[in-house]
Image (spheres, rainbow, N blue to C red):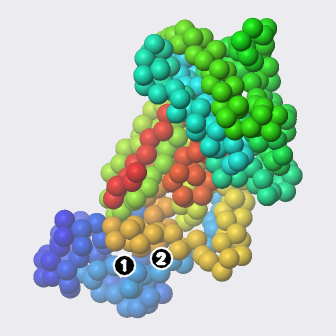
Amino acid sequence: RKLGKGESIQVPQGPDVVLKKDVPAGHKVAVVSRAVGEPIIKYGWPIGVATCDIQAGEHLHDHNLKCHHVLDYEGLASETPAPPSPLSGKTFQGYVRPSGRVGTRNYIAVISTVNCSAGVSKAVARHFDSQVLKQFPNVDGVIAFTHDSGCGMALDGIKHRTLGRVLGGIAKHPNIAAYVLIGLGCEQNTLGHLQKSQKLVTLQGVRWKSSPGQNESQDVPVLSIQDSGGTRATIRKAVELVKSLLPQVDAMQRTTVPASEIVLATKCGGSDGYSGITANPALGIASDLLVAHGGTSILSETTELYGAEQLFTKRAASVEVAKKLLDKLVWWKQYTAHYGEDIDNNPSLGNKAGGLTTIVEKSLGAAVKGGQTALQDVIEYAEQTTKRGLVIMDAPGFDPVCVTGMVSGGANVVVFTTGRGSC
């Protein structure tokens, strides 16, 4: 709650503190005095240093506190915890795919290889509205996966490889029972390159007909607008393709599977001063329970682990895994510096209004979503997860991009915690 000037705060193992001025809800109060340059401690770690002399009872925020963090390379993998005591008996109803992975939904995807085919993909998905799908109650929907890229990029460069992992991850995702790929025909991210680079060989146990009367095939259904006769012709052909898939996808049934088949994506956004002591640690406990059941928990937002990296590098499964995380943080520092920026530009104004002052404070509150188990691996953005347990995916803090990466990496459950609210 908001605290008023002159109010007295009881401090455990210390004298009572009288507030020097009003303090907004969710913000910080100094409970001991600090000289300029001395560290300010929260969550047991320095979140920055005092920019002026601070007296007990003063409001702590960006007017008297700044970030001052150096990456921690000490004690890598020196505190690796033992595996949690195994748990069993928890199950859910999921769709077991031919790949062995388990879906929590049953969708058909219409995937654009390039922004030029986004309109066609959306038109195809719009055709299959709630009225059309009434006769297919076991199909959760037909969804268009579109983006603003696919051309104007170096062939097999970093942007091309990243886009390929995202689209390939969607196509192979256990929540996607079947999919159709739609391209323009002259883009850099060609249909053939995407299929080859992401090993998109066959659909997940379904068969399709390229047109009425033709033989069934297990090849991936792909359509090029230029080869199909233009926009309207491509839409018509894609609609027929999806129609041929609907009965097969509708016939798929949920079965009882163990909780170990859950791949959990954890994300926080619109955070405030309460996030690190409420929703985020609660999610961390859930993450630990899932790992004990043999499942996988993904933590990401690399830029929002800066200042909390020691919580993971010390409990990494190996020195190599710890160094992977540190290398990613170095990359992000160099990336932001290239544009004359700094990682501490995050927190946002909304985060600061909610009481968060430095990126280190925000990171320490965000990191607890990862629980207390050993860090098993650090993977690229949208890379498919192969390790069970706690995994960190390299991703920016930007919410939609971050969640997209984890879903493309195989997450079949997403838990998003928020302090100030998020869409």
Image vertical order of residue 207 relative to residue 113, above or below: above
Q: Label 2 crowding class (10 Å Cα cut-off): few <14, some 14-19, many 20+? A: many
Q: Residue 119, image x and y in percent?
A: 62, 43
Q: Quadrant of the N terminus?
A: bottom left
Q: Judge by depth and name the residue closer to the eye, 312 or 246.
A: 246
Count of numbered tags: 2
Amino acid at the residue labelled 2: Gly
Residue ID for mark 2 = 48
- Label 1: element kind: loop
- The dot on residue 140 is none
Q: Label 1 crowding class (10 Å Cα cut-off): few <14, some 14-19, many 20+? A: some
Q: Residue 287, image x and y in percent?
A: 47, 38
| Badge nearest the viewer, 1 or 2 | 1
Report whether 368 appears left or right of 235.
left
Residue ID for mark 1 = 61
Q: Quadrant location of residue 332?
A: bottom right
Q: Residue at x 27, y 83 (%)?
A: 58
Q: Judge by depth and name the residue closer to the eye, 258 or 29.
A: 258
Q: Judge by depth and name the residue closer to the eye, 314 or 1.
A: 1
Q: What's the distance in space between the residues labelled 1 and 2, CA to CA?
A: 10 Å
Q: Residue 214, image x and y in percent?
A: 78, 10
Report whether 362 appears left or right of 142.
left
- Label 2: element kind: strand
Report whether 420 appears left or right of 228.
left
Q: Residue at x 44, y 88 (%)?
A: 51
Image vertical order of residue 15 relative to residue 396, above or below: below
Amino acid at the residue labelled 1: His
Q: Judge by depth and name the residue closer to the eye, 184 or 295.
A: 184
Q: Residue at x 54, y 8 (%)?
A: 251
Q: Residue 134, image x and y in percent?
A: 43, 17
